[in-house]
Amino acid sequence: MPFRGDEREQALQNKDCDVIETVQELQQEQEAPRTHGGNIRAASLRYGIAEKDIVDFSSSINPLGPSSAARRAARKAIDRIDRYPDPDMSELRTAIARYYGIKPEQVVCGNGSNALIHLIPRVFRPKRVLIPMPTFSEYAAAVEDAGGEVVPLLLQEQNGFRVDPLDLSFALKGADMAILCNPNNPTGALTRKAEMLEILRSSCENNVRLVVDEAFMDFVDGDSLVKEAVQSSNLIVLRAFTKFYGMPGLRVGYAIAGSATARRLRSGQEPWTIDVPSEQAAIAALTDWGYAAKTRRYIARERDRLLSGLRLLGGVEPFSSPANYILLKLTGIDSRLLTDKLGRRGLLVRDCSSISGLDDRYVRIAVRTWWQNRRLLKALREILGS
């Protein structure tokens, strides 16, 4: 039976409502990414502050920015964007291998270390993956996306959120992969090499593949497992050019492993994972020794100054860190309120309430320049009444 005029109008309105609801649901799914720091654009829109006036303490990026050598290499490489990148990334893998004194076939490059974090469980299909928490949330997301089960090992605040090798060795039983971040993000806890070697031995004894994310290890001397990774079939080490080299906008990460493991990972990648300017910038950054030395001196000095200032404030308890970020425990305000109050002042910090193992008493701040750190300390004194 055909609709009368008013019935037809009502039916069309109902249909429009259904369509609108469906679109809204899709938009919510698309607009709800996993929570990470560094969304300056969203903060600018939320607080009505120009992006250039926002200081981002929520992303732990080298405040010195990329090296001049990396900038020059990226600009020069623009002339080559009319051709496809090398799908094997041979030049970059050779540069990384030369830097560490290993072989190019032991290196896997990817579109940032995050792409490799997702590649590893997708290739090896682990059933149960042990992850000490709190830590970077993308590890659990990658495991679950690949159909695996996350087995959390909760780290204790009274122990500085440090990994106990004995506790971890017991927890390894029944797992077929473990993922650790060292130094750990966001807690800053560093597991020294002697303890990491204990963990590696336990992993080998239990036939557990160990993945160690060393995204912040460039800030620390002497505790990397890169050399051990190429000699073991159980160990994969992840690195990136994001944090220390200050290039989050050029997505370059890499994994180091034994030749067979690396070959298997490369076979699971899509082609052309890194563009030419990014590749050339990364190669140039590796050879800029002056930039690396300057960064380590600068971060160590400003981190100590920032820690000293934070320890004078009431309402916050900072955790020591060897990297370029500091975890704060709040005692007089919750993380959401503090994040909002700082955001209104053009200062972004990482609210850690979304990180498993932490709650709304914790925020993470990056170490930035002297005057930016002073601006943050001043804002914290005003908000906390210290």
Image: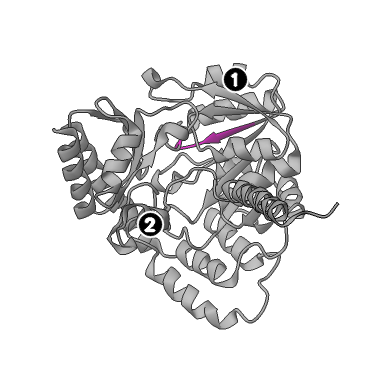
Q: Residue at x 52, y 58 (%)?
A: 99
- Up-down relation of residue 82 to residue 4 (above or below): below
Question: Is 322 within the magenta?
Answer: no
- Up-down relation of residue 127 to residue 71 (above or below): above
Q: Which of the pair 118/195 is nearer the observer?
A: 118
Task: Say which quarter of the image contains residue 371.
Answer: bottom left
* Side of 167 relative to 314 (left or right): right
* Side of 3 relative to 235 (left or right): right
* Side of 219 relative to 317 (left or right): right
- Up-down relation of residue 337 to residue 349 (above or below): above
The secondary structure type at the circle numbered 1 is helix
Q: Which mark is first along the chain, 2 or 1? A: 2
User: What residue did someone put label 2 on?
Assistant: 45
Quadrant (top left, top right, bottom left, bottom right) of the C terminus = top left
Q: Which label was assigned to residue 14?
A: none
Measured in 3D between alpha carbons, the distance from the residue under mark 1 to the one under mark 2, in whole angstroms, is 47 Å
Crowd class of label 1 (few under 14; some 14 to 19; many from 20; radius 10 Å):
some
The secondary structure type at the circle numbered 2 is helix
The amino acid pointed to by label 1 is: Ser
Q: Choose mark 1 or mark 2, whichever is in front.
A: 2
Q: Position of residue 325 (x, y in %)?
A: 35, 42
Q: Which of the pair 136/266 is nearer the observer?
A: 136
- The range drawn in magenta is 178-184
Q: Residue at x 44, y 69 (%)?
A: 70
Counting every numbered tag in the picture gives 2
The amino acid pointed to by label 2 is: Leu
Q: Is residue 327 in view from this perspective?
A: no
User: What residue did someone put label 1 on?
Assistant: 169
Crowd class of label 2 (few under 14; some 14 to 19; many from 20; radius 10 Å):
few
Name of the residue lying farthest toward the right: 1
Q: Position of residue 247 (x, y in %)?
A: 45, 60
Would you say the residues marked 1 and 2 are in contact, meaning their CB atoms lie under 8 Å apart? no
